[in-house]
Image (tube, grey):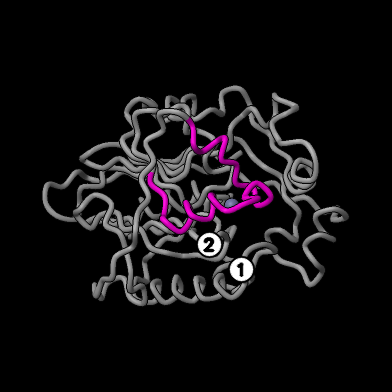
Amino acid sequence: MTGNATFSEKASHEGVGSIRSVSVINMGTGEVHREHIHGSRKPALWWIFFGRRWVTIPINVYVIEHSDGLVLFDTGQNRAVVTDPDFWPKGVTGTFMRHLFRFHIAPDDSLTGQLEKAGYSAGDVRKAVFSHLHSDHVGGIREIPQAELLVSNEEWENMLRPHAERHMIFRRDIEIPGAKWEQISFRPTDDPSIAPFTHAFDLMGDGSMVLLPTPGHTPGSLSMLVRCDDAPPLLFIGDLAYGVELLERGELPGTGDHKQLRAGFAKVLALKERMPDLVILAAHDPKAAEALREASSRR
Ligand SMILES: [Zn+2]
C-alpha cells in the first residue's frame, strides 16, 4: 500500500483558486490479471480463467478540499468483499468476479478510517463524484449518507440495463435507501482551455472542478479536471487507464470498449499538450501519492 499524500494549496478567494488541498487515500489493494491492465491478444475469457500473472494495484480515493466543502472522487471497495463469503452473487457472476479480482482490505481501510487518518471526517463529505459505478468505486457510499453522489447520466443508464452485474455493477450497492444520487448531463462548451473536450460539467460553478466525459472503460465513465491558481492542474481519469505511463504509451487495458478508450486516450493526451504541467492520476495508480507530492513541490 502506498502512503497517503497531500497536495496543499494556499486558499485563494476569487475565481479558480478555491481548491485548498488534494490528497489520495488508499482503501486497500486489489489484485488483477496482468492482461487486465496491459491488454492481451488472447480473448478476455481466456486470461480471466487461465491467467496466472497477478498484479497488485491500490484502490485510490481522491479527496479534494474546496472552499465550499469536501469532495471525493470515487469511494473505494466495500470491505464486505473480504469478510462476507456471499458478497458476490452466486452463479456465473460470482465465479467470474472471483477469477477477475482478489481484494486485500484491512479493517481500517474503510472510507471513514482512511479519511480520519488524513485529518477529515466522513460526515464532512459534501459531494462524491464517481468516475463510474464498478464495485471497487462505490463501496463507501453507506459511510457518507449526507453527501450528494454524482454520476454521469450515461453511467446511470448503463446500471439500469439488464445483467449490469455481469459487468461488475451491482444495483444493490448503488441504489441504497437514502443515497442522494444525482445524474449529470455534460453540457456543450467552447472553453478553449479544455479542448479537445467539447462537453463538460462545472461541478462547483467556479471552474475549479470540471467533469469531462471519457467513456470506454464503461459507457458513462468520466474524468475530473481540478484547477488551482498556483499549482499544476490535475486530471483524475478513473479507470480510463491504470497508470499515466500506459496512457502515454497508448497501451489499452484488457477490458472496455477499445475504440472509445483509444479516443479517450487521444483526448487526454491532447489536453496535456495544451496544459504541459497537467498531472494525470488514475484510480489504481500505484504512483498517485508520489505524483501529488511532486505536483505540490511545483507550486
Ligand atoms: Zn472499473
Q: Is residue 144 left or right of residue 262?
A: left
Q: Quadrant of the N terminus?
A: top right
Q: Residues within 10 Å of mark 1 (few under 14, many from 20)?
A: some
Describe the element under mark 2 as helix, strand or loop. Answer: loop
* Region of the chain picked out in magenta, as a range: 150-176
Res. 128 mark: none
Residue at the disc numbered 2: 219
> How far across and down, in percent of the image, does residue 245 sit?
57, 66
Residue at the disc numbered 1: 257
Q: Nearer the viewer, residue 89 or 81?
A: 89
> How far across and down, in percent of the image, does residue 269 sit?
46, 74
Rendered position, 43 above or below 116: below
Q: Quadrant of the C terminus?
A: bottom left
Q: Is residue 7 left or right of residue 48?
A: left
Q: Nearer the viewer, residue 51 or 156?
A: 156
Q: Residue furthest right?
A: 50
Describe the element under mark 1 as helix, strand or loop. Answer: loop
Label 2 is placed on what type of residue?
Pro
Label 1 is placed on what type of residue?
Asp
> How far across and down, in percent of the image, does residue 137 sit?
53, 43
Is residue 171 in the magenta section?
yes
Disc 1 CB within 8 Å of nearest ligand 1 atom: no
Measure the C-alpha gap from mark 2 to mark 1: 8 Å
Residue depicted at 38% across the width and 64% down the height: 278
Is residue 149 in the magenta section?
no
